[in-house]
């Protein structure tokens, strides 16, 4: 096996994170940081895209903006947690809704963690690492 083949295999074993946000700048910031620290990343631009990609890609975790156009992140989370194919995927809510009741509502919808915007990518990565550590065994970045 060549070094390139070994590197590709290692990359495939890294957790896949689905970053869901309708603002391109937010998606890019989180996606680039997560790639930088060793995760594989897929992106979704709205709720319908998030549901489709969660079903087709089976990510290891979802970083979910709650304020999405159309099907919002609250509803996407409810749907993913009700679906046998996606119910065990940890969902980390990222939201500008920062009041305590918003975090409580996110957790009631099925989110596994909540991060208030604005947030540093390191904080988000820490929540992802904690969620993955609880759900699966990976060599975490």
Image (spheres, rainbow, N blue to C red):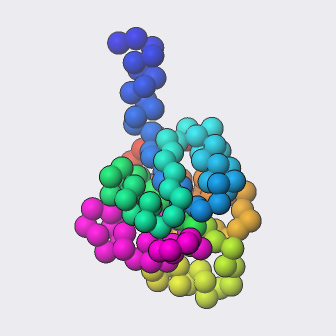
Residue at (69, 53) in percent of width and height: 25
Q: Could you say which is closer to the camera, residue 10 or residue 130?
A: 10
Q: Residue furthest bottom?
A: 101
Q: Residue furthest top?
A: 2
List x then y, in percent, for residue 37.
Answer: 61, 40
Q: Could you say which is closer to the camera, residue 113 or residue 93?
A: 93
List x then y, in percent, for residue 139.
Answer: 46, 40
> Is 50 displayed left or right of 35 in the figure?
left
In the displayed structure, would residue 76 be above or below residue 43? Answer: below
> Is 126 displayed left or right of 12 in the figure?
right
Q: Quadrant of residue 50?
A: bottom left
Highlighted range, magenta: 67-93
Q: Would residue 85 be seen by someone viewing this image from the given angle?
A: yes
List x then y, in percent, for residue 43.
Answer: 51, 51
Q: Could you say which is closer to the camera, residue 116 or residue 139?
A: 116
> Is 56 displayed left or right of 115 in the figure?
left
In the displayed structure, would residue 113 be above or below residue 5? Answer: below
> Is 92 displayed left or right of 101 in the figure?
left
């Amino acid at each position: 096996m060549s070094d390139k083949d070994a590197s590709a295999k290692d990359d495939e074993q890294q957790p896949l994170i689905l970053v869901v946000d309708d603002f391109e700048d937010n998606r890019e910031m989180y996606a680039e940081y997560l790639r930088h620290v060793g995760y594989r990343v897929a992106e979704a631009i709205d709720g319908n895209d998030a549901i489709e990609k969660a079903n087709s890609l089976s990510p290891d975790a979802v970083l979910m903006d709650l304020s999405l156009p159309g099907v919002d992140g609250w509803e996407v989370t409810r749907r993913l947690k009700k679906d046998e194919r996606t119910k065990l995927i940890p969902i980390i809510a990222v939201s500008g809704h920062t009041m305590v009741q918003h975090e409580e509502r996110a957790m009631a919808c099925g989110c596994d963690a909540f991060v208030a915007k604005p947030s540093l990518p390191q904080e988000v990565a820490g929540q992802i690492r904690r969620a993955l550590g609880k759900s699966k065994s990976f060599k975490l970045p």
